[in-house]
Amino acid sequence: MSSSSYSSSPCAACKFLRRKCMPDCIFAPYFPPEEPQKFANVHKIFGASNVSKLLNEVPTFQREDAVNSLAYEAEARLKDPVYGCVGAISVLQRQVITLQRELDATNANLFRYAYNEMPPLRPPQPPPPSAAGQSSGFCYPYQWNDPSDEDNERSSGGNM
């Protein structure tokens, strides 16, 4: 045992797994001792053995990105065990749709105002949450298609 092995703290993975952190530890560069929860979450969802196998299969220059992806997915799975990242992505997609509609309405109002066609209108309000699960703030995959869009396409005949 060299004195250098005592000078550095074991990585979060080895500390969590209660084992000695060797100099060639696959986890050490990606799970520093200051971030124990990062490894705890990844371990709970994926398991240390699976993460170790994955890191050994991924090229060295991509390992940090792989670990960051695993950590993000693990945290998302702990928050939402059914949908994980898909739930978060759905919320963001819904926000993009809402913001795009607001931008379109604002641009239309600006155009009308610039040409004195009519006074500016208020931008549309986001739809109220339905009982299908949107009240929690999540939009699940089966809710991605907005039925009001289909109604609008039918009523306008597809013309813009």
Image (cartoon, grey):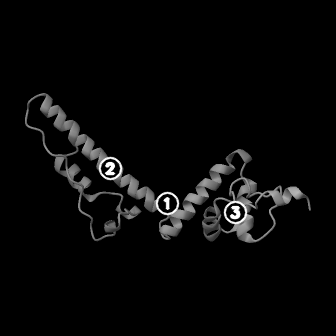
Residue 66, position as x, y percentages in the image: 64, 53
Dot placed on the residue nearer the N-terminal end, 1 or 3:
3
Residue drawn at x 17%, y 32% is 111
In screen coordinates, is 80 left or right of 46?
left
Q: Are marks 1 and 3 in contact (CB under 8 Å)?
A: no
The residue that label 2 is drawn on is: 97
Circle 3 — which element?
helix
In screen coordinates, is 73 left or right of 66?
left
10 Å neighbourhood of mark 1: few (<14), some, or many (≥20)? some
In the rendered image, the vertical position of residue 160 relative to residue 133, given as above or below:
above
Dot placed on the residue nearer the N-terminal end, 1 or 2:
1
Dot placed on the residue nearer the N-terminal end, 3 or 2:
3
Residue drawn at x 81%, y 57% is 7
**Discs 3/2, front:** 3
Q: Seen from this angle, which residue lies furthest top?
A: 115
Residue drawn at x 63%, y 49% is 65
Which amino acid is tagged 1?
Answer: Cys
Tell me the distance, in whole angstroms, between the alpha carbons under discs 1 and 3. Answer: 24 Å
Q: Is residue 67 in view from this perspective?
A: yes
The residue that label 3 is drawn on is: 12
The residue that label 1 is drawn on is: 85
